[in-house]
């Protein structure tokens, strides 16, 4: 009887899960390197214009596991020639429990990509060097600012689509 009461008390006190987070796995999901202007580009003055595009995706694997994939595309051009193009999908599996929806969105959209980025950056640098180009150390990315900007854009779009928000800015 005492054991049953103790178990019942443990069950009622444990209703709300305590927030928890754990990195379970980091892996390379996809990788591509192209150097379409080689070897001619090696003879040109090396002052590349480097462009970085990034994207994150996430999907829930089960009650507490999430996959987050950070996709980076780096394009280096010398004049009109593409010196190299690198695309990487750096993945991670994270155990996340007990977060409110807003906290979960922030974790998946900013915190997890911050963990994945150094791995993707190192892989890109290694590939570029193996392609016989000078090392490319990408600058850090502020995923918190990117996430905050995306939230502001969604809020602005939602307000713009709300009834009563006419082009004149007044209410009807």
Image (cartoon, rainbow, N blue to C red):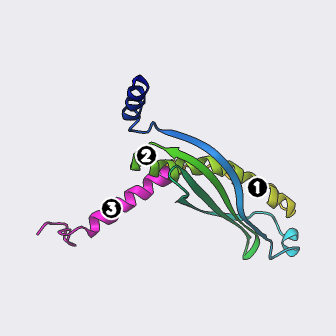
**Residues at marks 3 and 2 touching, judged by CB atoms closer than 8 Å:** no
The circle on residue 156 is 3
Which numbered dot is residue 103?
2
* Callout in the foreground (1, 3): 1
Residue 12 vs 135, above or below: the answer is: above
The residue depicted at 80 percent of the width and 72 percent of the height is: 35
Discs 2/1, front: 2
- Between the C-alphas of marks 1 and 3, the distance is 37 Å
Frontmost residue, 91 versus 62: 62
Tag 1 and tag 3, C-beta contact below 8 Å: no
Location of residue 111 in the rendering, given as x and y in whole percent from the top left corner: 54, 46
Labelled disc at residue 7: none
Mark 2 and mark 1: span between their CA atoms? 29 Å
Residue 18 higher or lower than 80, as above or below: above
Left or right: 22 in relation to 107:
right
Foreground: disc 3 or disc 2: 2
| Residue range highlighted in magenta | 145-172
Can residue 59 be seen from the camera position used here?
yes
Q: Residue furthest left?
A: 172
Q: Main secondary structure of the magenta part?
A: helix
> For mark 2, does the 10 Å Cα neighbourhood hold few (<14), some (14 to 19), or many (20 or more) residues?
few
Q: Quick check: is 168 in the magenta stretch? A: yes
Question: Does the magenta segment cover residue 19?
Answer: no
Label 1 CA crowd tier, 10 Å (few <14, some 14–19, many 20+)? some
First in sequence, mark 2 or 1: give its number: 2
Q: Position of residue 66 (x, y in %)?
A: 55, 54
């Amino acid at each position: 009887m005492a054991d049953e009461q103790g178990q019942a008390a443990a069950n009622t006190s444990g209703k709300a899960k305590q927030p928890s987070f754990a990195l379970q796995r980091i892996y390379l999901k996809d990788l591509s390197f192209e150097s379409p202007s080689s070897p001619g580009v090696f003879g040109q003055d090396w002052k590349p214009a480097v462009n970085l595009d990034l994207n994150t995706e996430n999907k829930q694997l089960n009650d507490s596991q999430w996959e987050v994939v950070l996709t980076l595309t780096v394009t280096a051009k010398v004049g009109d020639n593409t010196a190299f193009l690198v695309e990487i999908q750096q993945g991670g599996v994270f155990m996340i429990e007990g977060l409110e929806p807003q906290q979960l969105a922030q974790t998946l959209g900013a915190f997890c990509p911050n963990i994945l980025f150094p791995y993707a950056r190192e892989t890109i640098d290694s590939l570029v060097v193996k392609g016989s180009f000078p090392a490319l150390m990408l600058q850090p990315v502020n995923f918190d600012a990117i996430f905050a900007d995306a939230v502001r854009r969604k809020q602005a779009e939602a307000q713009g689509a709300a009834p009563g928000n006419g082009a004149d800015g007044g209410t009807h």
